[in-house]
Amino acid sequence: MKILEKAERLKKLPPYLFKEIDRKKSEAQAQGIDIIDLGVGDPDLPTPPHIIETLKKSAEDPANHQYPSYSGMSLFKETVAKWYQQRFGVKLDPDSEVVSLIGSKEGIAHFPLAFINPGDIVLVPTPGYPVYHIATLFAGGESFFMPLIKENNFLPDLEAIPADICAQARIMFLNYPNNPTSAIADLDFFKRVVEFANKHQIAICHDAAYTEMAFDGYSPPSFLEVEGAKEVGLEFHSLSKTYNMTGWRIGFAVGNKKAIEGLGAIKSNIDSGAFQAIQLAGIEAITGDQACVRHMNEVYKRRRDIMVEGLNELGFTVDPPKATFYLWVEVPSGFTSAQITSRLLEEAGLVVTPGNGFGEPGEGYFRIALTQKSDRLIEALNRLKKMTF
């Protein structure tokens, strides 16, 4: 029957990782299991009150009830440009080098539609955020996966990419601080990326969603800090993790004018921009008191320390990350990623994410999101103590 037969692009998609996790979690809850969900990276901390108050006032203003600008409010874009200058020393033209997004995921998903023709290759990190590959498929492109392995500090080996692939590639996705591995990249690496991009004429899309979630005095850099970076790419940013605004759907992309123009052209034909009241709340987030961000990082650092110490005492292998709220934990000997995550759910009521769900090189790991209060993390460790591996 041809009525409502799914398009080929949908048939090519792997099961969306987090949808599968939700399904398994629901099955366990239906059996009466007390679940401690360490799976999806959705902050449990509330959005700071001053941001909520700005939304309330802005939502009541009739001036915000009409269609917003497709590319974003001028004030929002100017605020983003000022923040980039203050935070990273990067100068941006708010009119041509900044575009607002309905969350950075939306922008990442739409970008290949602007620059990828059927058969073009996109360089995709693996393990990695699934949307990079899915967006490539939706645009008719083909993913060439760049393995992120421990021996290379979870950075892609640019020299290992075959010459014929480089010749066909149009886009490279990067993400540091990294999800799921929590790895970091320095400016020397980004310099090599810019050289690679220039040599092979490849656009760089850097997903920088976690630059403000860092510990122990570490301050993650922007890809755009490197000389020449703005000539070869753009950077995606989100307020979701920095200000606990995942449900608000507000982010932005900055960088190369042609890249921003292309992304904006796709957006203007697909969506009608972000609700102005939420953009105004985003402005308050960026320009307001940043004590909320410092508090958030203190909370996640405490949680990180509890789990890293506890897991290592139990015989797991995990390094304390300098950024993100993820732990990339090695699977005990004798288990696969899927086997260990199933056992943790069935025997301990713990939801974690199998590493291979982010890509084949993720086999041998599982990811923990530090999105539970400290007492629940301690409870999770106590449950683990009762298991044998």
Image (cartoon, rainbow, N blue to C red):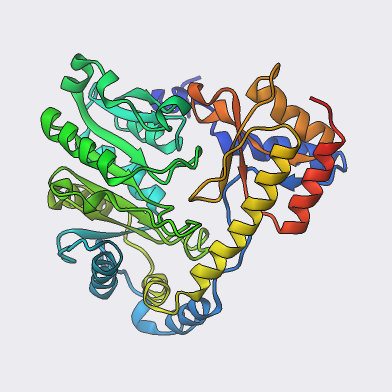
254, 249: nearer the viewer: 254
Q: Whole-percent x and y of residue 77?
A: 25, 68
Who is closer to the viewer here, 9 or 109?
A: 109
* Residue 96 at least partly seen: yes
Question: Residue 225: x, y in percent?
Answer: 22, 53
**Which quarter of the figure has residue 217?**
bottom left
Residue 330: give x, y in percent of width and height: 62, 29
Percent from the top left, x then y, of residue 152?
A: 40, 28
Q: Closest to the observer: 126 or 76?
A: 126
Residue drawn at the location 78% of the way across and 44% of the way down: 381
Quarter of the C terminus within the rendering: top right
Q: Relative to residue 125, is residue 333 depicted above or below? A: above
> Would you say 371 lies left or right of 84 here?
right
Residue 240 left/right relative to 97: right
Kindly identify the residue that appears in the image at 84 percent across and 31 percent down: 387
Residue 193's place in the image compared with 126, above or below, is below
Relative placement, left or right, of 249 versus 97 is right
In front of the other: 141 or 254: 254
* Residue 297, quarter of the rendered image: bottom right
The residue located at (13%, 32%) in the rendering is 201
| 64 horizontally vs 161: left or right | right
The answer to whether residue 266 of the structure is visible from this angle is: no
Number of numbered discs visible in the structure rendering = 0
